[in-house]
Image: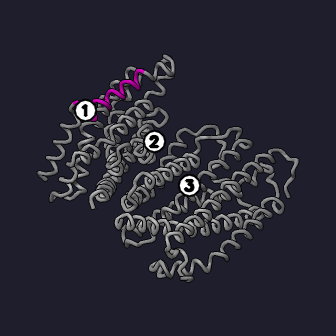
Amino acid sequence: MIDWNADHVSFVLVAYGIVTLLLAAIVVATLRRAVTLKKTLAGMNLSDPGQRDKA
Amino acid sequence: MIAFTAILKRDIILGLRQGGGAGAALAFMLSVLVLIPLALGPDQNLLRRLAPGIMWLALLLAVLLTSERIFQLDYEDGTLDALVGISLPLELVTLAKALAHWLAVGLPLAIIAPLLGILINIDTTALPILMLSMILGSLSLSLLASIGGAITAGLRRGGLLVALLILPLYVPVLVFGVSATSAETGPTGSFSSLLVQVAITMVSLVVQPWASAAALRAYFR
Amino acid sequence: MQIFANPNRFFQIADRAMPVLWVATLVAFVVALYFAFFNSPADYQQGETVRIMYVHVPSASLALFVYVLMAVASAMALIFRHPLADAAAKAAAPLGAAFCFLALVTGSIWGKPMWGTWWVWDARLTSMFVLMLLYLGYMAVWRAFDDPHRAASLARIVALVGVINIPIVKFSVNWWNTLHQPASIVRAGGPAIDKSILWPLGMMFMAFTLLFISTHLVALKNEVRARKIRAEKLKSMGNS
C-alpha cells in the first residue's frame, strides 16, 4: 500500500501520469487513424484490407 | 581492379580539389581549435586535460560534415548511374569511394589534428598514440559515413538525416578513440583500446560495402 | 510462421483476436496498477519511488525488444520479400520510440530523488539515449522519401545496421563508464529482487507487452489500408 504522505510521492505520480498520457495518446491516435482510413476506403468504394472476414 | 583504382583516384582528386570535401573539413577543424579556447578560457591545465577529446570531436564532426558528398554529387550528375552499370560489383564501388573519402579527408586530418593539438596544449608525449588511434578511427569514420551518405544520396537536403543516422554509429569509435589517448587508461589500456578500434574498423569494413550498395540499389531499381 | 505467409489469413486471425487482446490489455493494466500502488511495499532504501520501477523497467525492455523486432521484420523483408514485413517494422517504430522515451523520462524522474540529479551519463542511460537516436533516424528515413518502396528498402538497411550497432554501443559505453566512473551512485547489478516486487513488475510487463501487441496490430492494418489508398489514388491519377 502506498503511503500518500511519504517523500517523493509526487515523483511517482508524475511518472505514472506521463506514462499513462503518452500510451493513451498513442492508442487513441492509432485507433483514430484506423477510423479515418476506413472512411477514406469507404469513400473510394474500396473494401477494407484490414477486415477480410467480413468481405 | 582497374575500375576500383580508377574510382579511388578520381574521388581522391575530386575530394582534394577546391569544392571537394577536404578543404572544408580542414577549415572546420581549424575553426573548432580557434573557438574552443575562446569558449573554455585559456586555462592551460584545463585545455591539456580536454585536448584529446576535443581533437577527436573535431575530427568526427569534420568527417560527418563531408559525409553527404560521398555519393550525393555523383548521384546528381549521373555518375552513379554509370557506376551501377559497370562490371565491378556495386559493393566494391562503394568501398572504393569510402576509401577515397578516407584518403582525401580522414587520413590528412588524422595526421594534422594531433599537431594542431599543440594549440590547445596537448600532451606531446601522447601524440604518437593519438595519431595512430586517429588514423585507425578515421578509417571507420569514413566507412560509416559512407553508409549514411549512400542512404541519403538522393535527398537534396539530407544533412540533418545523415547526422542523425551516423551519430549512433560514431559512438563506439569516439569512445575507444578517446580512451586510447586519455591519461586514465595507461599504456595497457591504450593498447587494448587500439585493439578494439581495429575490431570496430573490421566490422565497419564488412558492413559498409553491403549497406552502402544496398542503399544505392534502392535508388536504381 | 505459416500464418504470416498469407496476409489475408493473418488478418482474419488478428481480427478475431483483437477484442480479446484489448480486454486483456485493460485487465492487465488494472491488475498491474493495483499491485503497483496498493499491494506492494515501499522499498526500505528507495521509499515510495521504487514504484516508478514498475513502469520504467517494462518501458526499457520493450524499447529494446521492439527494435529487435523491427530488425527481424526488416531482415524478413530483405530475404523473403514478405509483403507485410516492411509495414510491420514501420508500424513498430513509433511504439518503440515511445517506450524508449518513457524509459528515459521515468528513469530521469526516478533519478532525481534517488541520485539528486535528473540525468547521469551512466552506461545504461547513455545506451538508451543512443537507442532513441536510432529510432528517430529510422522514422526520419520513412518520412524523408515520397516513394514508399524506396523508403522501405532504405529503412531496412537503417534498422539492420542499427541492430548491429546496439551491442557495440552497449559494450563501448560500459567500457567508457568504468573509465570515467564517478562516485558510484548506480550499483551495477542492482539489489536482489524480492518476491513482493516481482508481482507488480511482472504484471506491468505483461500489460505493456499486450498494449504493444494490440496497438501494433492496429497500426499494421493502418499501414496496409494506407498502402491500398495510395495505390488506388495513383491508379485513378493514371486513368484521368
Mark 3 burial class by Cα count in 10 Å: few <14, some 14-19, many 20+: many
Chain at tag 1: B
Residue C97: numbered disc = 3
Mark 2, Cα crowd under 10 Å, few <14 / some 14-19 / many 20+, is: many
Residue pictured at 70% horizontal, 45% vertical: C109
Which quarter of the picture shows residue B33? Answer: top left
Question: Height in image: B13 above or below B2?
Answer: above
Depth order, front residue of C51/C102? C102
Which portion, as a residue range, is magenta? B18-34
Q: Amino acid at mark 1?
A: Gly
Q: Which residue is mark 2?
A: B175
In percent of width and height, residue B169 lies at: 42, 48
Which residue type carries mark 3?
Ala
The percent position of residue A25, horizontal first and vertical second, equals 65, 57
* Residue C157 horizontal/vertical position (percent): 38, 58
Q: Which mark is residue B210?
A: none
Q: Is residue C191 above or below residue A54?
A: above
Q: CA distance from mark 3 to mark 1?
A: 38 Å
